[in-house]
Image: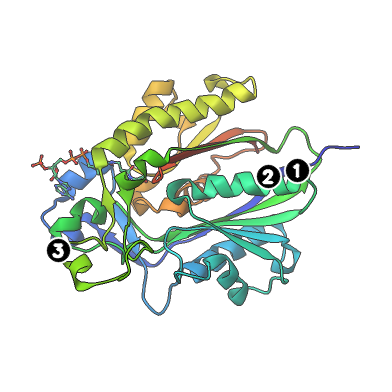
Amino acid sequence: MKQNFARITGLGYYVPETVVTNHDLEKHMDTSDQWIRERSGIVTRRFYTEGKDTVSLMGARAAEVALSRAGLKPEDIDFIIFATLSPDYNFPGSGVLVQKHLPFRNIGALDVRTQCTGFVYGISIADQFIRTGMYKNILVIGAEIQTNIFEMSNRNRDFAVLFGDGAAAAVVQHTHDEHRRILSTHLHSDGHYAEDLMLEHPGSNLKDRMSSKIVEEGKHLPFMKGNAVFKHAVTRFPEVIMEALDANQLSIKDLNLLVPHQANLRISEHVQKTLGLSDEQVYNNIQKYGNTTAASIPLAFAEAWEEGRVKEGDLICLAAFGSGFTWASALLRW
Ligand code: UT7
């Protein structure tokens, strides 16, 4: 009997229309265009519009593009995986809300909560469901509205300058092709660092989930030990990329394109240098969108595809590191 494999057959994205520059941010906090560009490479990011954009709606818009590029209709999808740290509601998840925007059948919908690695975790889950023969067509969405999580103020300026809003999606389909497929996925986490990059409240630990004290202390705002995240990221990225290549008896020279999670251009450049990758082998678009967390990899992957940087037979590595800490990679032959 032929073996089941999975491959990505369509990519799409949606970004909100409002472009916010570094100079715009200077008006709200002590920061500068120069500081932001030098430390992160970011020039602009998108801000969502209240009443027009929701996380599930943005995800649905991205999904429509991915579906049409895959030549499928929402009715053809067997399962929805929605990766986000900024769901529309505390519950239910945004995966089920996508079903209100597009005509899916009453299929299962799963939210993934691994932040920056959410899309790669989602691809891994989709790959496993398809390999076992349970499903044929799976939609994996990564979408975030983050520009209302942080405060446009000095106490949250490390976050406010880095993050943006956006959505992207991939259609993962069954194939018997042994060559052009998702080759392997590799998932990791270390919860000892959970508090180094987190948003604590409203959580379930306190009787008063939200209080004026929490707000005064800024505990409702995202917190990040930037330097610690940076240091772990530049170690874990190369590690998990090499793990994927080694697992398939491939090497850096075989890699046509690395699509790293867009956390910081300096992190991507560090990883590129450590692994000895050329500029042609790495795709970055953080300059335009900032860090869009779960949306960042599919957003970069979809743009790379639109720009003709992804060709038939190319070896592509998706790699991510972020809050948890979690880190992950997916190696695929396009
Ligand atoms: O998706 C994964 C999640 N996040 C990441 O991967 C982020 C990883 N970390 C980073 O990207 C970097 O650590 C940052 C971009 C967050 C910070 O860059 P850094 O070079 O590590 O700067 P720093 O935290 O060491 O801060 C340097 C200075 C500090 O001032 P002092 O103490 O030297 O006087 C900060 O207070 O820069 C100050 N600073 C700012 N200045 C202007 C911090 N944020 C800002 C800001 N504008 N927005």
Residue 8 in view in this figure: no
Nearer mark to the viewer, of 3 and 1: 1
Quickly name the residue at label 3. Answer: 28
Quickly name the residue at label 2. Answer: 127
Q: Position of residue 112 (x, y in %)?
A: 53, 55
Circle 2 packing at 10 Å, graded few (<14), some (14-19), many (20+), is many
Element carrying mark 3: loop
Amino acid type shown at disc 3:
His
Element carrying mark 2: helix
> From the Cβ of disc 3, is ligand 1 less than 8 Å away?
no
Q: Position of residue 220 (x, y in %)?
A: 27, 63
Q: Please report whichever mark, 3 or 1, sits nearer to the chain's N-terminal start.
A: 3
Q: Is residue 272 left or right of residue 301?
A: left
Element carrying mark 1: helix
Amino acid type shown at disc 2:
Asp
Quickly name the residue at label 1. Answer: 131
Counting every numbered tag in the picture gives: 3
> From the Cβ of disc 2, is ligand 1 less than 8 Å away?
no
The answer to whether the residue labelled 2 contacts the one labelled 1, judged by CB atoms less than 8 Å apart, is: yes
Farthest residue toward the front?
207
Q: Is residue 152 above or below residue 299?
A: below
Q: Please report whichever mark, 3 or 2, sits nearer to the chain's N-terminal start.
A: 3
Q: Is residue 260 above or below residue 9?
A: above
The answer for how far apart the CA atoms under marks 3 and 2 are is 44 Å
Farthest residue toward the right?
1
Q: Is residue 228 left or right of residue 311?
A: left
The answer to whether the residue labelled 3 contacts the one labelled 2, judged by CB atoms less than 8 Å apart, is: no
Circle 1 packing at 10 Å, graded few (<14), some (14-19), many (20+), is some
Q: Quadrant of the N terminus?
A: top right
Q: Position of residue 321 (x, y in %)?
A: 42, 40
Q: Position of residue 248 (x, y in %)?
A: 65, 24
In this view, the residue in front, 239 or 167, is: 239
